[in-house]
Image (cartoon, rainbow, N blue to C red):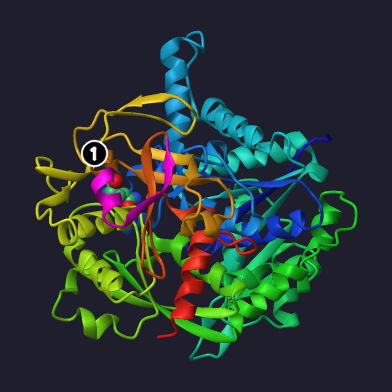
Amino acid sequence: MSETKYIFITGGVLSSLGKGIASASIATLLKNSGLKVSILKADPYINVDPGTMSPLEHGEVFVTDDGAETDLDLGHYERFLDENLSQKNNFTTGRVYSTVIEKERRGDYLGKTIQVIPHIVGEIVRRIKKAGEGQEILIVEIGGTVGDIEGLPFLEAIRAMRVELGKKNAMNIHLTLVPYIKVAGELKTKPTQHSVGELRRIGITPDMIICRSEIPLNRDLKNKIAISCGVDKNCVIESPDSASIYQIPLTFLNQNILEPIAENLALKKLNPNMSKWDSLVKRVIAPNSEVTIAFVGKYLDLKESYKSLTEGLIHAGATLDTKVKINWVDSEKLNSENVDKILKDVSGVLVPGGFGERGIDGKMTAINYARINKIPFLGICLGMQLAIIEFARNILNIKDANSMEFDPNTKEPLIYLIDSFIDANGKKQIRTYKSPLGGTMRLGGYDCNIKPNTLLSKIYDTKKTRERHRHRYEANPKYREILEKNGLIVSGESDGLIEAIELKNHPFFVGVQFHPEFTSRLISPNPVILNFIEASIKNGR
Ligand code: GLN
């Protein structure tokens, strides 16, 4: 295969402009033009990975099939590209320094002085090239904003790579904000000019500028940006606020973004086939009907921590031509007194994953309500664990039923901690559980064997599936027999571990230990989520 070509994406003015979505959108257009494309997120922060970062601060931790805990942008990449990414598609300053320091301690540098240039920058370049192996194009998104001190080695790395690879093998795209000043009724280009100036100062000249703005930019303004920032006129692309993030590849395509990209990178003419995408986006924006789902969680002030799941609901809705309206229910405020009032009009109840004891009683109240009133229910990870505890307490009459997460000394550990397990790469992991943060998690993709003639087997329509995990605790097989005797079916398992449950005599009551949302994509929604929404639509309440 020919050499990999690189598209480097930087951000200016401020963060949260949607660089990840812009990167994923360009990648999608290139992939649908028949190219082999992948994406890398290089994060300048010092954490070695986002695994221990608070969801309140950093949004969701996205888990790849090979068990890496990564930045939530990787989730966007997978959802757009419809491809599995891996460990090598995300790295941080912390990871880069760890590698260099490890090598230094081993004596690999033969006594040399270790410096940011060349050693740290060299390690960044090595990691970028590793992610590019086997690809025709690698999109590299540099986290943070130009001007951040910690971002400098990353910018130096892409500057040097472009020089080394030559102009036809690398291009720079800069995403900035063009603010709209309401009182003046004007869009302002000055911040963009400053941010491009800052990039230039460190030796990077953008080939294309993507402008985020509240409203569309007119031709004059685009020309002004082109002239003041020194890019071709067809290289100023606008990205106004959209009704759906999935619209953005189409917004870019309408502006012929692929023409200058093909020209810059000396590629043949690119003609992406976006017809399926286009029809799904139409259904996301103007769906035929609506269904309301109760989302019973505890991180409600930061919905970014449920990003993959809320996107998964959008994917299912697009396929079913239905808007999935989320009724956010704060599990800490839900109790037996108000549950009927809060849940009586919803068509389905969703209890997502979570950590810690806060809010679990409210979640169990919701599960109990869905079970008794035969409302479609989906419990994910903690949601499945709580469904088992609820069943044990109220059907099996094991009043002390609990999870060791909430009571390490519980007499009835329906949910318990196993001391060793095989990880996603086939290696045996021994749990060194000391504190809630320090325990070893079961992470990444695992095969799940599906019991024939169950709802789960109908959902997946296969005997075996593969889904991703992120948890410490497991359903305790000691209780399996008594649970099954009383109508709870273990419908999925992996090496003796209970991966999925469902209830007899209920239209849709499914709990999964894995996170189906991590494999949901716009063009191929996850079957569990899709069937849950379908059942909720049928429920018709
Ligand atoms: N806290 C539970 C565990 O660690 C569930 C985790 C989750 O929902 N992701 O097993």
The stretch in magenta equals 480-494
> Relative to residue 199, is residue 234 depicted above or below?
below
Comparing 260 with 487, the one in front is: 487
| Circle 1 Cα neighbour tier, 10 Å, few/some/many (<14 / 14–19 / ≥20) | few
Comparing 65 with 460, the one in front is: 460
| Quadrant assignment for the C terminus | bottom left
Does the magenta segment cover residue 491? Answer: yes
Give percent across and percent down for residue 164.
Answer: 74, 34
**Which residue corresponds to the image point at 70% horizontal and 68% vertical from the top-left?**
277
Query: Disc 1 designates what residue?
Result: 478
Q: Can residue 146 be seen here?
A: no
Comparing 161 with 390, the one in front is: 390
The image quarter containing residue 504 is bottom left
Q: Determine whether, in the image, residue 212 is placed left or right of residue 101.
A: right
CB at disc 1 and ligand 1 closer than 8 Å: no
Give percent across and percent down for residue 134.
Answer: 73, 35
Give percent across and percent down for residue 28.
Answer: 70, 58
| Quadrant assignment for the N terminus | top right
Q: Determine whether, in the image, residue 12 is placed left or right of residue 62.
A: right
Name the kind of residue labelled 1 in the image.
Lys
> Relative to residue 224, is residue 398 depicted above or below?
above
Give percent across and percent down for residue 407.
Answer: 12, 46
Q: Determine whether, in the image, residue 231 is placed left or right of residue 438.
A: right
